[in-house]
Image: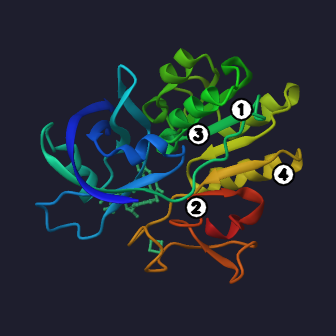
Amino acid sequence: MNQETAEILWNAPAGASVYRIGLSCGSEYARADAGQFATLRLPEESSPLLRRPFSIHRLIRNDGEFQGIEILYKRVGEFTRKLSQAPAGRRIDILGPLGKGFTVTASIKRPALVAGGIGVAPMVFLAEKLIQAGMASDGAVICLGGRSADDVLCAPDFQAMGLKTRITSEDGSIGEKGRVTEALSDWLKDHSPDMVYACGPVPMLDAVSKIAEKQDIACEVSIETVMACGVGACLGCAIKDTRHQSGYGHVCIDGPVFNAARLELTDRH
Ligand SMILES: Cc1cc2nc3c(=O)[nH]c(=O)nc-3n(C[C@H](O)[C@H](O)[C@H](O)COP(=O)(O)OP(=O)(O)OC[C@H]3O[C@@H](n4cnc5c(N)ncnc54)[C@H](O)[C@@H]3O)c2cc1C
Ligand code: FES
């Protein structure tokens, strides 16, 4: 973990209220796991006071040389509004890489990735890591879902990597009409993934973990909670965790990625 002042390399719209920001940060991130995150602060802004957490979307390399990280973010409130207005060249305070990421091993050959809305942010990095670990890209499926076409992000990135892509939207404006969990259930009729990885809203994660449990498939979920410190000091991100001695884990240090079997997600929505 390192705190530094990074330079904004680019900060450009990538959809409705969604942006990609490139940051020139230190080489610790070159060894980051997919699912890890960093917390950001705009140094010259007094508000918001608290740093904000964002997943590593992908590593930036130039001729193989590590340059920094890219973050995919949605404008939802004060910080992300100010961030969306920050131009290339401006400095930003970044702390990371933080937390525990997804398990990636050479034995995972046919995973199902499930992403709801901006929950897709860590999944591009995850797909890259799985391919680097030896997974044949056409062995994997990514189920992408959202309320409407605006919420379905990064499909071309996964297609370029060769993953099978299933797209759903609740209003039917893109892909099949319905929920991303229905696409997963449909996939499971004819396929047996060796792992399910998911990131998105808690009700979606709860549904995905129940589907995986029913079919006896290992499942990891990345949880988003409001975080104050991001480093295990404030206890603000507690989550019921059956494998933790105290009965509670902390999303910022024990997660954000958890084995779904450890968590009780139903009472969080
Ligand atoms: C580990 C982790 C990784 C994340 N990765 C990304 C990412 O890659 N891209 C991205 O766009 N966002 C990500 N988030 C969410 C991001 O941190 C929040 O959107 C951001 O902090 C909002 O700050 P704000 O000041 O703009 O909005 P605020 O004014 O703080 O909040 C605006 C609205 O969003 C809600 N909100 C704020 N934070 C969260 C949260 N964590 N979960 C659910 N609702 C929230 C608030 O309740 C409020 O309704 C991640 C969160 C965590 C914990
Ligand atoms: S955010 Fe402070 S302990 Fe997790």
Q: Nearer the viewer, residue 145 or 255?
A: 255
Residue beneath disc 2:
255
Q: Give the percent coordinates (x, y) of residue 153.
A: 47, 31
Q: Give the percent coordinates (x, y) of residue 202.
A: 60, 57
Q: Give the percent coordinates (x, y) of residue 74.
A: 36, 44
First in sequence: mark 1 or mark 2? Answer: 1
Q: Residues within 10 Å of mark 4 (few under 14, many from 20)?
A: some
Q: In the image, which disc is placed on residue 115?
A: 3
Mark 1 close to ligand 1, CB under 8 Å: no
Q: Tell me: residue 164, above or below residue 233.
A: above
Q: Gap between marks 2 and 4, in whole Å? A: 20 Å
Residue beneath disc 1:
183
Amino acid marked by disc 4: Glu
Residue beneath disc 4:
213
Q: Quadrant of the C terminus?
A: bottom right
Foreground mark, 3 or 1? 3
Q: Is residue 109 left or right of residue 131?
A: right
Q: Secondary structure at mark 3?
A: strand
First in sequence: mark 2 or mark 3? Answer: 3
Q: Is residue 71 left or right of residue 255?
A: left
Q: In the image, which disc is placed on residue 2?
A: none
Mark 2 close to ligand 1, CB under 8 Å: yes
Foreground mark, 1 or 4? 4
Q: Gap between marks 1 and 4, in whole Å? A: 16 Å
Q: In which image quadrant can residue 13 be found?
A: top left
Residue placed furthest toward the bottom = 246
Q: Are marks 2 and 3 in contact (CB under 8 Å)?
A: no
Q: Secondary structure at mark 2?
A: loop
